[in-house]
Amino acid sequence: MKQILSPLPGTFYRKPAPDQPVYKSEGDSVAPGDVIGLVEVMKSFHEVKSETEGKVKAFLVENEGPVTAGQPLVDLED
């Protein structure tokens, strides 16, 4: 199983803004470079990009949930 990890500690967001749709949902395909969410650190937002391809099996963190650096955010399947 492949995973997408948090690059930084902070708060994970699945949407670019509260009134916008999520970047990716379960069942969506991802390719290298696709944005799957944001991590906010001290009011600075950093894109979380996939480094591999696959299909989103599950998000492991709730929207607006706290994360640590290296924490798995998404499980991917082939």
Image: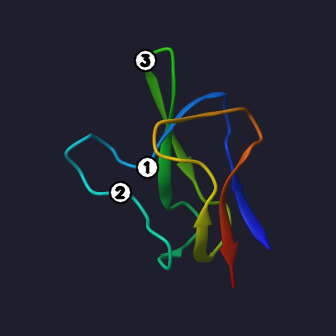
Q: Residue at x 64, y 55 (%)?
A: 60
Q: Are marks 1 and 2 in contact (CB under 8 Å)?
A: yes
Colour style of the rendered protein structure: rainbow
Which residue corresponds to mark 2? 22
Which residue corresponds to mark 1? 14
Sequence order check, earlier mark of 2 and 3: 2
Residues 44 and 22: in front is 22
Regarding mark 3 in the picture, which secondary structure is present there?
Answer: loop
Residue 31 tag number: none
* Figure quadrant of the N terminus: bottom right
Sequence order check, earlier mark of 3 and 1: 1
Looking at the rendered structure, the kind of residue marked 2 is: Val
Residue 36 is situated, as x and y percent measured from the top left of the image, at 49, 56
Residue 44 is situated, as x and y percent measured from the top left of the image, at 45, 21
Which residue corresponds to mark 3? 43
Looking at the rendered structure, the kind of residue marked 1 is: Arg
Separation of disc 2 and disc 3 at Cα?
A: 20 Å
Above or below, 8 against 22 in this view is above
Q: Which of marks 3 and 1 is in front?
A: 1
Q: In this view, does 70 lie to the left or right of 42?
A: right
